[in-house]
Amino acid sequence: QVHLVESGGGSVQAGGSLRLSCAASGYTYSSKCMGWFRQAPGKEREGVTSIYTYGGISITSYADSVKGRFTISQDNAQNMVYLEMNSLKPEDTAMYYCAAAPSVSSGDCYSGSPVFRYWGQGTQVTVSS
């Protein structure tokens, strides 16, 4: 059973930065697919980014709305996933969720993929104008 815990959310002004962290436990698979999703009030949950790692390979994908501003990274030794968010905009305001998809291929691991089946409790990000 994979357990995910997010942290690092908060309130910032537009143009600011935040770094979200996700601690994963019970994730013992040799290949890892991790992702970040977000859900704003009244809106559907959307994929933000994903990262697939296996051996020395790391493949990332991003939603168009965050490309060039957000960066996902992973520390397999510490079982941590990070989301560095820069140049934040008010439309980035949402609850952000860490997600995991064990035992999937690299082709199935992408931002917003339906293969994610383990979820954290979420961390709130609020960006004011």
Image (spheres, rainbow, N blue to C red):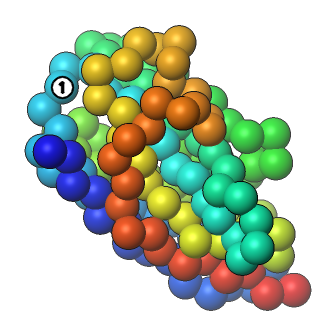
Percent x, y of residue 101:
37, 33
108 left or right of 100?
right
Which one is nearer the viewer's eye here, 89 or 25?
25
Task: State the residue at coordinates (57%, 53%).
Answer: 37
Q: Is residue 17 visible?
A: no
Q: Is residue 79 left or right of residue 26?
A: right
Is residue 86 positioned above or below 1 on the image? below
Nearest the viewer among 96 and 44 is 44
Observer-nearest residue: 69 or 54? 54
Amino acid of disc 1: Tyr
Describe residue 42's horizontal placement relative to residue 39 as left or right: right
The residue under the point 55% across, 78% down is: 124
Quadrant assignment for the N terminus? top left
Q: Which is nearer the eye, 83 or 6?
A: 6
Image point 48% across, 42% down: which residue? 35
Indicate the position of residue 77 as horizontal and vertical percent values.
17, 39
Judged from the image, the secondary structure of the residue bearing numbered disc 1 is loop
49 w.r.t. 93: above or below: above
Determine whether 30 is above or below 21 in the image: above
Give the residue at mark 1: 29
Q: Residues within 10 Å of mark 1 (few under 14, many from 20)?
A: few
